Amino acid sequence: MFTRRRFVGSAAATAAAGAGAFALPGGFGPVHAQGRPFTFTSWGGVLSAMEKEAFIDPAEKLFNVKIVNASPTNQAKIKAMVEAKAVEWDLVDVGGRSIFAGRDQGFLESIDYKIVTNAKNLDKRWVHSHGVYTSTGATLIAWNTKAFPAGKGPQSWKDFWDVKNVPGPRGLYKLMYYNYEAAMLAAGVKESEMYPVTPEKAKQAIAKVKEIKPHVKVWWTAGAQPPQLLSSGELAMCSVWSGRLFDALKEKAPIDFTWKDGIAWGNAWVVPKGTPHKDLAMKILNSALTDEAQTRLLKIGVYGPVLESAAKKATAEQTKQLVMHPDNLKRMMLLNDEQAGMYMTKYEEDWNKMLLA
């Protein structure tokens, strides 16, 4: 299963398609092709709300078009739509791994860098042939502040695995994604030796997760779960997506976290192959990479910019929640989405056997 969140259906995308055709400025052709308006799809929750506010609503005004916001993202659905020649989504936040699956399996358009010219201002790690990252986040270690005195929560994945000295019920993501990296860090493997993933390394990571499995009370599948489970005290500690964490902290949730051993990643946008709105999709992607659009992310305060010029504008308070700030990033590792996509596919059966054993 490929999703940061479990796919539960495409009703949102289908129901959102309204009636009435209208034309795009600049000769792009009819927006209402195939009986629907332009559709942007993301994961839902905090991320979708952020993208709507920072990128999609401004793009509606900029290009004078109606944009439907749908969720959740699902790689299998994108591939199926393309193969059926019935593409319902025009621009999609896929996280990261689908860039490479879509490239290799042929269900994504190549990014037109004659249109997406603002990508030249990004670090090369965020720019690929079939997708571009528009925001950054991380998978972090967080804990309930009532379960641990100040400064006594787990400060590394090694601590997270230390059930004797750092007791309490744990929570981990249900997929191998992030857990491969967390387990290897817990085992003392250096970031420089994490990739490329080999059969031996995958076996080592799965065995490491098996060690802690009896103490994992919840294998979570949706980003909203970790903050809720930590706030209620059901879990003492849990892996958590930074955006969901920071959104909870705005509400004074009894949660603390560490940047140490964080697994930094980005949210990549892709264009499904065969969309009738390809050029508009590229233009909207380009608009999300402007300094103005990226700076909006700082005020929203959940996921951060990929554009360094925007990140440099962060206040001291905003910096505390900025994944890409040097002081935070130096304590983390950067997820390799191409390698993650590979191990998610190649070792999924081994991972599932471990969970079910």
Image (cartoon, grey):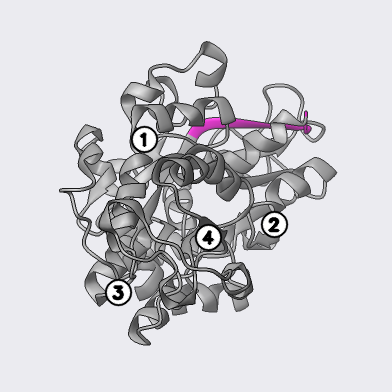
The residues colored magenta run 252-260
Disc 3, disc 1: CB below 8 Å?
A: no
Q: Position of residue 55 (x, y in %)?
A: 46, 41
Of labels 4 and 3, the one closer to you: 3
- Give neighbour class at mark 2: few <14, some 14-19, many 20+ (Cα, 10 Å): some
Q: Position of residue 89 (x, y in %)?
A: 44, 68
Whichever of labels 4 and 3 marks the residue nearer the N terminus, that label is: 4
Disc 4, disc 3: CB below 8 Å?
A: no
Compare residues 159 and 92 and report the one nearer the observer.
Answer: 92
The residue labelled by disc 1 is: 306
The residue labelled by disc 3 is: 274
In the rendered structure, does residue 256 fall within the stretch colored magenta? yes
Give the alpha-carbon distance from disc 2 to disc 1, as whole Å.
36 Å
Which type of secondary structure does the marked residue at label 2 adopt? Answer: helix
Compare residues 125 and 160 and report the one nearer the observer.
Answer: 125
- Give neighbour class at mark 1: few <14, some 14-19, many 20+ (Cα, 10 Å): many
Marker disc for residue 215: 2
Whichever of labels 3 and 1 marks the residue nearer the N terminus, that label is: 3
The residue labelled by disc 4 is: 4
Which amino acid type is shown beneath numbered disc 4?
A: Arg
Q: Position of residue 78 (x, y in %)?
A: 41, 74
Can residue 168 be seen here? The reply is: no
Of labels 3 and 1, the one closer to you: 3
Compare residues 9 and 225 and report the one nearer the observer.
Answer: 9
